[in-house]
Image (cartoon, rainbow, N blue to C red):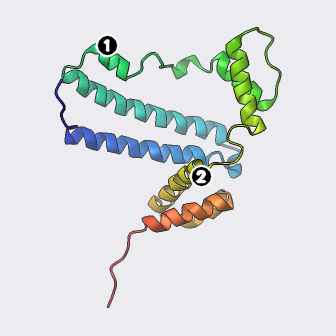
């Protein structure tokens, strides 16, 4: 198969879909804040699945193009990483439940399953602060970028202080200010 640039309409569609995903990801972060205690479960699941579905749509558009241009089906399946795919309709797996049990400090199920123990330990490390105890700079910057972008798009930068920890709000505010469209100077 020859190397060709992505067709412009497909490129524009992917950019639009990724923008939608970013907005959904920002809302995922927003609904983790303490002031969202009444809606966090519902809204986190809605926005996380919206982001996932939108990325799936982008992948399928690209896959349809690849198929149209003659890509072999086994190559396409490899690029789509179909062996990793998992349906949300099946609900959480035991491994997910084991990881949550570790996070929440509940006992490990008595099964002698190596995967169960590994996932339980992974959850415990999250809870004990071994993983992600202090937000690293990259994670903090990513969160601030998402919040700052959303605040700028909604023209509601002042709201950042009402729901974010002060250090995240300050960085998000700086990012929103950088994104502000400069006005022409008046004489």
Along the line of sight, the residue nearer the viewer: 146 or 79:
79
Residue 96 placement (x, y as % from top left): 65, 22
Residue 179 placement (x, y as % from top left): 43, 64
Distance, label 1 to label 2, CA atoms, is 40 Å
Residue tagged 2: 137
Along the line of sight, the residue nearer the viewer: 116 or 186:
116
Circle nearer the N terminus (1, 2)? 1
Residue 137 placement (x, y as % from top left): 59, 52
Foreground mark, 1 or 2? 2
Residue tagged 1: 74
Q: Quadrant of residue 115?
A: top right
Quarter holding the N terminus? top left
Residue 167 placement (x, y as % from top left): 65, 61
Can residue 53 be seen? yes
Quarter holding the C terminus? bottom left
Judged from the image, the secondary structure of the residue bearing numbered disc 1 is helix
Residue at the outermost bottom position: 187
In the image, is 27 to the left or to the right of 59?
Answer: right
Name which residue lies at 76% across and 27% down: 102
Q: Residues within 10 Å of mark 2 (few under 14, many from 20)?
A: few
């Amino acid at each position: 198969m020859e190397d060709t640039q992505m067709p412009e309409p497909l490129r524009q569609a992917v950019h639009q879909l990724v923008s939608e995903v970013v907005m959904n990801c920002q809302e995922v972060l927003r609904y983790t804040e303490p002031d969202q205690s009444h809606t966090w479960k519902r809204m986190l699941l809605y926005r996380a699945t919206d982001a996932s579905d939108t990325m799936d749509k982008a992948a399928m558009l690209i896959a349809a193009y690849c198929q149209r241009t003659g890509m072999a089906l086994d190559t396409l399946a490899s690029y789509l990483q179909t062996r990793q795919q998992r349906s949300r309709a099946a609900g959480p797996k035991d491994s997910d439940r084991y990881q949550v049990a570790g996070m929440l400090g509940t006992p490990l199920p008595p099964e002698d399953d190596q995967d169960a123990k590994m996932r339980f330990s992974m959850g415990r490390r999250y809870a004990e602060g071994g993983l992600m105890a202090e937000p690293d700079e990259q994670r903090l910057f990513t969160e601030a970028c998402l919040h700052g972008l959303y605040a700028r798009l909604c023209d509601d930068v002042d709201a950042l202080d009402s729901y974010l920890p002060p250090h995240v709000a300050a960085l998000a505010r700086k990012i929103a200010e950088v994104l502000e469209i400069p006005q022409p100077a008046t004489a």
